[in-house]
Image (cartoon, grey):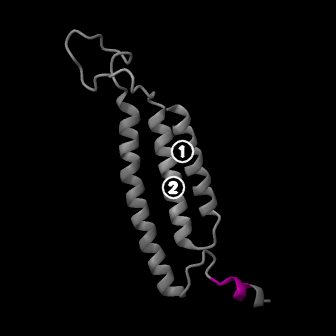
Amino acid sequence: MEIVLAISIGVLTGSGVWLLLRPRTFQVIMGLSLLSYAVNLFIFSMGRLGMAVAKEPLLVPGVPQDLQHYADPLPQALVLTAIVIGFAMTALFLVVLLASRGISGTDHVDGVHAHDAQEMP
């Protein structure tokens, strides 16, 4: 299970970095989203992958109150917060993308087409 998670985090990170280096703003936004998903999976995996042993999420009478008997709630809370922040960030970036495209007429990151940049002195 750990190898599948590690490979998926690596693929998401590699795809996100590749999309971040693209010249169009929508691809940059998608790259940021993929990177945020990779970071969320990484943070979630730091809370230990324990599918074989069922751990209680809530306190149960008679069970010692330590992390050996319960699921760690901190990575889950961090990932949930990161999902909400990532959704708001993506919505804001899409609004800025639409406004920038309306003003400049292009969706390139630098604001000019590649053939226009070559013609400029």
Residue at the right extreme, as displayed: 121
Q: Position of residue 46 (x, y in %)?
A: 48, 31
Q: Is residue 33 left or right of residue 79?
A: right
Instruction: Give the vertical position of 92 relative to 71 (above or below).
Output: below
Point out the stretch of residues depicted in magenta: 112-117
Mark identifier at residue 34: 2
What element does badge 2 sit on?
helix
Instruction: Give the vertical position of 23 relative to 44 (above or below).
Output: below
User: In the image, what residue type sits under mark 2?
Assistant: Leu
What element does badge 1 sit on?
helix
Q: Residues within 10 Å of mark 2 (few under 14, many from 20)?
A: many
Is 114 part of what is drawn in magenta? yes
Residue 23: quarter of image: bottom right
Q: Is residue 77 left or right of residue 116?
A: left
The residue lying at 19 percent from left, 13 percent from top is 61
Mark identifier at residue 51: none
Closer mark to the observer between disc 1 and disc 2: 1
Total marks shown come to: 2
Q: Position of residue 81 (x, y in %)?
A: 37, 46
Given residues 3 and 48, the one toward you in this image is 3
Q: Position of residue 66 (x, y in %)?
A: 35, 15
User: In the image, what residue type sits under mark 1?
Assistant: Ser
Residue at the left extreme, as displayed: 61
Query: For the C terminus, which image quadrant?
Result: bottom right
Chain-order first, disc 1 or disc 2: 1
Question: Predominant secondary structure in magenta?
Answer: helix
The residue lying at 55 percent from left, 79 percent from top is 107
Give me the C-alpha separation between circle 1 and circle 2: 11 Å
| Residue indicated by mark 1 | 8
- Kindly indicate whether the residue at mark 2 contacts the one at mark 1 (C-beta within 8 angstroms): no
Instruction: Give the vertical position of 13 relative to 107 (above or below).
Output: above
Q: Is residue 95 left or right of residue 119?
A: left
